[in-house]
Every structure is written in structure tokens, then in C-alpha cells.
Image (spheres, rainbow, N blue to C red):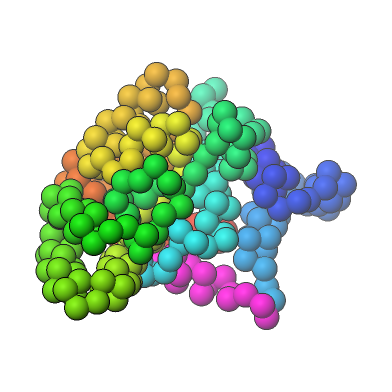
């Protein structure tokens, strides 16, 4: 169900194509394998215009890769939901189920979804499309100070803050560019630091510390607000039990590697 839902919404397949593959598969297990291969080829086509599958896995693991502007981001975040919901359960009477509308990113005004950084990448702003270069020197300085207080592995951000203060005295434009490049290098635009959230709750989070964001998400989930499985798993640090009350640069790296492993296991199991 979940693989088919994903293919229909994300890969533009037809019912006839599905029926043909079902008729040729002979067994249910073979059909499931066919669907996984189909999804893989749809997301990572084998052609000369794109990197191959293994190179995409390396991009996922590489925290310096800017996934915030990557066209495949939404496809992969929703795929991670499908993978989670497709896992075998001990109790078949309690199988997870995702409504059809969630096989694609919600874009209507009432239920719109957007990508959210777990560790913030820019100062607070009412305008969601503002980049670090659009903020004043003072706003960026205060943001970096706040960032050092949000994490326990402060050294890299503290070095960036000190360098930014010095560079801003000489050239504000270069200072902003330096911050942009360094935050990207540290992984703030890594897929390991980005989740998909509904727009309305997203306004609640803004640049709150991780512990507050997590509390809001867990509370909303308990109140029946739909939180995507991958988003919820990431915020409760399902894959990392160390320092569960903070989200550090190391967590971004760990999560990115976990995402790559999860996707590869799904396709090659």
C-alpha cells in the first residue's frame, strides 16, 4: 500500500503499469521487490545527466551538501516515512497507515508543509525565504551567539562567531558570505538537519532550542496533530540516545548517515 501510494504520487505511474508488473511478478514478495526497484529508478534514474545511486548516497552522508535547495529533498523525506511505515510489525492487527494525501508534500494554505531546520540556519524572520545574507550584521551576530547556547559542542560555532566579528569590521558582505559557507560546511543544510513540518506548527518552533521544539512536537503528536513518522523519529532521537535533550552538530552527521543506511537497506534488502 505505502509503496504504491508513493509511486502514484511521486513517480507519475499509471494503474495499467502497476497491473502489468503485478501480473508478471507471480508472487507477492516478488511484487514488493519490483516496487522497491521501481521507486529507486524513479528517484535515482540511471542516465548520464545525474549522479549515480552511490554518489547520491554519498551526498546524503556528506553534511556539507546543501540539501535545503536540493530538488530531491521532498521525495526523500517522504520516502523515509514510507520506509518507516513499511517495516514488518510483530502484531499485524496494528499496522501503521498513512493517508493518501501525505504521499506528497501538502501545499494548500490550510495544511501546507515546509522544510524545517532542526538546528536553525538563519535568524528569526517573518519572511521564510530570507537567507543569511539578507540579515544585518547585528542580527547575524546575535544569531550566532544564540546558536552557541543551543548546542554543547560549541567550538566550531564560537570560532565562526569570532571570525565573523573580525571580518565584519573590514567587509560586511564577505563576513556574511563567510557565515553562509561555514554554516553549510558544518551541516546546517544537511538532510540530517531538515525535516518536513506543517506550516502552522512550524510557526510555533521558529528558532526555539531543540528541547523546546521537541516538546512542542511530542505534545502536538499526543493531541492528534499529524507529525510525519520520520520527523517524529528524528526529534525523539530514535537513532541516537546520547544527550537526548540537545541537538548537536554530531547529531546531524549521525542522522545523515542513518538516513543513507535506511534508504540503501530498503532498496537492497
Q: Residue furthest bottom?
A: 48
- Residue 183 can be seen, yes or no: yes
Horizontal and vertical percent for residue 144? 20, 57
Is 193 left or right of 99, judged from the image as shown? Answer: left
Horizontal and vertical percent for residue 109? 58, 33
Task: Give, as a single range, the part of the protein colored magenta.
Answer: 48-61
Instruction: Name the residue at 32% across, 57% down.
Output: 135
**Which quarter shows the N terminus?**
top right
- Residue 254 can be seen, yes or no: no
Q: Is residue 55 magenta?
A: yes
Horizontal and vertical percent for residue 249? 24, 59
Res 159 quadrant in image:
bottom left
> Is most of the magenta stretch helix, strand or loop?
helix
Instruction: Name the residue at 62% across, 75% down.
Output: 50
Res 141 quadrant in image:
bottom left
Is 218 rendered above or below residue 229?
above
Is 37 left or right of 118, judged from the image as shown? Answer: right
Is 229 rendered above or below residue 268?
above
Is 25 left or right of 259, judged from the image as shown? Answer: right
Q: Nearer the viewer, residue 54 or 208?
A: 208
Instruction: Name the residue at 43% across, 46% down.
Output: 127
Q: Nearer the viewer, residue 219 or 234?
A: 219
Res 121 quadrant in image:
bottom left
Is 149 left or right of 18, judged from the image as shown? Answer: left
**Which quarter shows the C terminus?**
bottom right
Q: Nearer the viewer, residue 179 or 31?
A: 179
Q: Is residue 249 magenta?
A: no
Horizontal and vertical percent for residue 4? 70, 43
Number of numbered markers: 0
Q: Nearer the viewer, residue 121 or 177?
A: 177
Instruction: Name the residue at 68% across, 60% down.
Output: 42
Amino acid at each position: 500500500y505505502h509503496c504504491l501510494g508513493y509511486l502514484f504520487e511521486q513517480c507519475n505511474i499509471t494503474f495499467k503499469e502497476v497491473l502489468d508488473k503485478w501480473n508478471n511478478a507471480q508472487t507477492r514478495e516478488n511484487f514488493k521487490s519490483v516496487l522497491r526497484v521501481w521507486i529507486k529508478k524513479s528517484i535515482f534514474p540511471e542516465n548520464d545527466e545525474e549522479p549515480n545511486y552511490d554518489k547520491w548516497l554519498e551526498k546524503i552522508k556528506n553534511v556539507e551538501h546543501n540539501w535545503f535547495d536540493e530538488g530531491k529533498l521532498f521525495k526523500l523525506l517522504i520516502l523515509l516515512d514510507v520506509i518507516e511505515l513499511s517495516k514488518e510489525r510483530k502484531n499485524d492487527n496494528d499496522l501503521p497507515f498513512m493517508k493518501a494525501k501525505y504521499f506528497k508534500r501538502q501545499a494548500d494554505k490550510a495544511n501546507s508543509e515546509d522544510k524545517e531546520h532542526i538546528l536553525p540556519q538563519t535568524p528569526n524572520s517573518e519572511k521564510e525565504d530570507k537567507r543569511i545574507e539578507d540579515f544585518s550584521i547585528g542580527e547575524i551576530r546575535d544569531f550566532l551567539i544564540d546558536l552557541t547556547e543551543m548546542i554543547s559542542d560549541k567550538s566550531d560555532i564560537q570560532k565562526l562567531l569570532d571570525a565573523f566579528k573580525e571580518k565584519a569590521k573590514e567587509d560586511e558582505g564577505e563576513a556574511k558570505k563567510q557565515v553562509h559557507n561555514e554554516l553549510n560546511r558544518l551541516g546546517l543544510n544537511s538532510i540530517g538537519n531538515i525535516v518536513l513540518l506543517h506550516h502552522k506548527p512550524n510557526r510555533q518552533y521558529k528558532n526555539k532550542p531543540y528541547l523546546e521544539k521537541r516538546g512542542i512536537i511530542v505534545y502536538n503528536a499526543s493531541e492528534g496533530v499529524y507529525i510525519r513518522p520520520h520527523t517524529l523519529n528524528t526529534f525523539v532521537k530514535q537513532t541516537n540516545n546520547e544527550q537526548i535533550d540537545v541537538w548537536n552538530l554530531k547529531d546531524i552527521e549521525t542522522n545523515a548517515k542513518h538516513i543513507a543506511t535506511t534508504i540503501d537497506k530498503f532498496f537492497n534488502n
